[in-house]
Image (cartoon, rainbow, N blue to C red):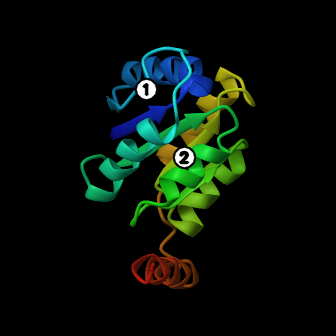
Amino acid sequence: MRIAMGTDHGGYVLKEDLKARLVAAGHDVVDFGTDSDASVDFPDFVVPAARAVAAGDVDRGIVLCGSGAGAAIAAGKIRGVRAATVHDVYTAHQAVEHDGLNVLALGGRVIGPELAWEIVDKFLGAESGGEERHARRVAKIEALDQSRE
């Protein structure tokens, strides 16, 4: 799978750990930065990763910041992106299966690398359940996305 990643300084260490694990697992990672723990603004790195997902250049995205909240908010501003901060394994797969999640946001200062890896593994392994009720809900989300002012 081809995966975009973007982070600020608060998620840098976790991004590097996850990126190494993803590459070792055979995934192709497109890293939009940052490249150190020096203070930067998360939108500068999260938004390009989200745009890659929206454009179809990658299959999914993983964005990080200290809490995961800012990264999810910034990524979610890109039309076609459905981003959420996830810090548990259930939501990691349920949000894909039911809600069409395509960008996972994680907090580098909130969870450790082992739990983060479990979450990423479930996120990447999940597919839409295809149930009519879920497809209907995702279609409503997409309609909202298209009607943004």
Q: Which mark is residue 90?
A: none
Whole-percent x and y of residue 68? 65, 41
Q: Quadrant of residue 113?
A: top right
Q: Is residue 41 above or below residue 20?
A: below
Residue holding disc 1? 22
Camera-side residue of 120 and 30: 30
Locate residue 111, reporting x and y percent: 73, 29
Which kind of residue does numbered mark 1 sit on? Leu
Is residue 90 visible to the viewer in this orientation of the structure? yes
Task: Write down the quadrant of residue 145 in the picture.
Answer: bottom left
Tell me where residue 96 appears, x and y as whole percent: 54, 59
Kindly identify the residue that appears in the image at 50 percent across and 65 percent down. Answer: 100
At mark 2, the secondary structure is strand
Q: Closer to us: mark 2 or mark 1?
A: 2
Depth check, front residue: 31 or 115: 31
Q: Quadrant of the N terminus?
A: top left
Residue with the mark numbered 2: 104
The residues bearing labels 2 and 1 have C-alpha atoms spaced at a distance of 14 Å
Name the secondary structure under disc 1. helix
